[in-house]
Image (cartoon, grey):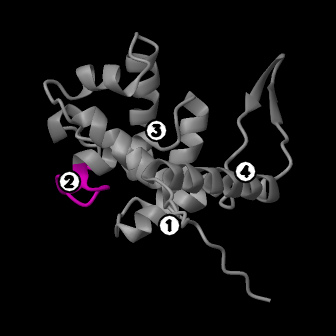
Amino acid sequence: MRVAKRRPSFVAKTMSKILISLITAFGLLHLLASPASADVFVAGSSAELKINSISSNDARVLTLRKYLVGHKSPLAEYAEEFVAASDKYGLDWRLVPAISGVESTFGKRIPKGSYNAYGWANGEYKFKSWEDSIEVVSMTLRTKYIDKGAPSINKIARRYAPPSTTWARNVRFFMYKIDAFPVTFDFEG
């Protein structure tokens, strides 16, 4: 009796890839993580905690930068800013870059000099710089969307891009693509 070999299903292959990606990401984070420390600034009798800056060796930064470079995005050199703003405002680190993918092909199709890769105010808004745009969009997503009852991409979409029925799906698509993008390290001895 001959037994037919079963090929792994699409789901099994996908789960395997996800598992490998997660293991790799956690391993990289462990290897690349710098010791955590907080700088405290004292002004008179009050103290303010300074949020640690994100390392350019953070696996998320490396993944995002490489993904954006692959898309020839002018935002590639701002990967650290995206990750730092996401940490500062408690956002998924892929959300704001994914929105830029949906709205402007990662900053390649924007009104001249606007730094508006996010379709902000239907593309009419002009930011001062890429850093300013990343900060304002991240802060506003937290304070005006998530904190005001839109904690999911679907709920954000209803306010951010009405009446679109594809915006949320497209944002999730780019988030998945960013996360699944393979990062390799070239070590020179």
Magenta residue check for 113: yes
**Are dots 2 and 4 in contact, CB under 8 Å?**
no
Three-letter amino acid code at the position of disc 4: Phe
Identify the residue at the far bottom of this view.
189
SS class, disc 4 = helix
The answer to whether 36 is drawn above or below residue 159 in the figure is below
Magenta residue check for 140: no
Say which residue label 1 marks.
66
Q: Position of residue 177 (x, y in %)?
A: 42, 53
Three-letter amino acid code at the position of disc 3: Glu
Mark before the other along the chain sequence, 2 or 3 = 2
Question: Label 1: how many residues lie within 10 Å, few (<14), some (14-19) or many (20+)?
Answer: many
Q: Position of residue 103 (x, y in %)?
A: 24, 45
Q: Position of residue 144 (x, y in %)?
A: 38, 18
Say which residue label 3 marks.
135
Mark before the other along the chain sequence, 3 or 1 = 1
Residue at the (22%, 38%) spot, across then down? 125
Instruction: State which mark lies toward you, 3 or 4.
Output: 4
Say which residue label 4 marks.
26
Question: Label 3: how many residues lie within 10 Å, few (<14), some (14-19) or many (20+)?
Answer: many
Three-letter amino acid code at the position of disc 1: Lys
**Are dots 2 and 1 in contact, CB under 8 Å?**
no
State the extent of the magenta-drawn residues as a range: 104-114
Say which residue label 2 marks.
110
